[in-house]
Image (cartoon, helix red, strand yellow):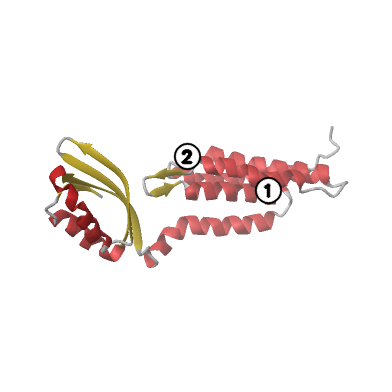
C-alpha cells in the first residue's frame, strides 16, 4: 500500500495547491468562468498525474507517458472558456491561465519546484502588469460590429456608402442584411485604425443616408 509513498509528494501537493490558489485568485476577482476552485483543481490534478506517472513509470523508464496526455487533455478545458462575441474573442487569457496552471502543476509534480515557481512569478507579472504595458504600447486598430439603418429607397446608394467607408477602414465585411418595414438594417464586421476612429464616427453621425447606427 505504501510502496510508492514519499513525504515529498505531500509537499508537492501543498505547493501545487498554493500555486493554483495564487493563479485562480486573479481570475476569481475578475469573475471569470474558471476561478479559484477550477484553477486550483487543475494545478493539483496535474501535479497528481505527474507524481503517479513518475512513481509508476520509473522502473521501465516511461515516467512521462501519463503526464504527456495532460498537455492534450487540458486543451478541452481551455476551449470551453473561449467564445466569440461578434468580432471579438473572449476567454483567451483564462484559457491561457488554465494551460499555465496545468504546466505549473505538472512541473511541481515532477519535482522541479523552483522552475515552476519562476514561471509562476513571471506569469503573475504579465497578468497583473500587462495592462500597464498596454498603455505604453496601445493597439493601433480596433475590431467592432457596425450596424447601420437605411431607408429602402436608399438601397441602391449603399454601394457608394460602402465605398466611402472602405476608404476609412482597414477592413469591412458585410455579415447580415435585414429588411424591416421601410428600413434596411445592415451589419458589418469592421477593423478601424484608432487614429481614424473619431473621423469614422463623425462620418456616421453626419451622413444623411444613415438613419441610425450602432458601433
Residue named by callout 1: 106
Residue named by callout 2: 33
Q: Quadrant of the N terminus?
A: top right
Q: Is residue 77 above or below residue 190?
A: above
**x and y, in percent, of residue 8 in the image:** 76, 46
Whether residue 15 can be seen here: no
Residue, x 48% and y 44% (percent of image)? 82
* Residue positioned most to the left: 208
Left or right: where does residue 199 sit relative to residue 126? left
Left or right: where does residue 187 sit relative to residue 72? left
**x and y, in percent, of residue 109 in the image:** 71, 47
Q: CA distance from mark 2 to mark 1?
A: 22 Å
Circle 1 — which element? helix
**x and y, in percent, of residue 164 in the image:** 22, 60
Quadrant of the rendered structure where residue 149 is? Answer: top left
Left or right: where does residue 145 sit relative to residue 123? left
Residue, x 81% and y 39% (percent of image)? 5
Left or right: where does residue 2 sit relative to residue 175? right
Quadrant of the rendered structure where residue 57 is? Answer: top right
Quadrant of the rendered structure where residue 85 is? Answer: top left
Residue contact between numbered discs 2 and 1, judged by CB atoms under 8 Å: no
Amino acid at each position: 500500500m505504501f510502496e510508492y509513498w514519499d513525504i515529498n509528494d505531500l509537499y508537492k501537493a501543498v505547493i501545487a495547491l498554493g500555486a493554483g490558489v495564487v493563479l485562480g485568485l486573479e481570475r476569481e476577482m475578475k469573475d471569470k468562468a474558471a476561478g479559484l476552485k477550477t484553477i486550483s483543481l487543475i494545478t493539483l490534478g496535474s501535479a497528481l498525474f505527474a507524481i503517479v506517472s513518475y512513481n509508476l513509470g520509473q522502473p521501465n523508464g516511461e515516467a512521462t507517458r501519463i503526464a504527456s496526455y495532460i498537455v492534450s487533455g487540458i486543451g478541452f478545458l481551455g476551449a470551453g472558456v473561449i467564445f466569440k462575441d461578434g468580432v471579438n474573442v473572449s476567454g483567451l487569457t483564462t484559457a491561457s491561465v488554465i494551460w499555465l496552471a496545468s504546466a505549473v502543476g505538472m512541473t511541481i509534480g515532477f519535482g522541479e519546484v523552483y522552475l515552476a515557481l519562476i514561471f509562476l512569478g513571471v506569469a503573475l507579472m504579465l497578468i497583473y502588469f500587462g495592462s500597464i504595458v498596454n498603455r505604453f504600447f496601445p493597439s493601433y486598430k480596433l475590431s467592432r460590429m457596425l450596424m447601420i439603418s437605411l431607408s429602402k429607397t436608399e438601397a441602391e446608394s449603399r454601394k457608394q456608402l460602402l465605398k466611402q467607408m472602405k476608404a476609412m477602414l482597414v477592413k469591412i465585411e458585410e455579415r447580415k442584411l435585414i429588411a424591416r418595414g421601410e428600413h434596411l438594417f445592415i451589419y458589418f464586421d469592421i477593423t478601424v485604425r484608432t487614429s481614424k476612429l473619431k473621423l469614422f464616427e463623425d462620418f456616421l453621425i453626419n451622413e444623411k443616408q444613415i438613419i441610425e447606427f450602432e458601433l
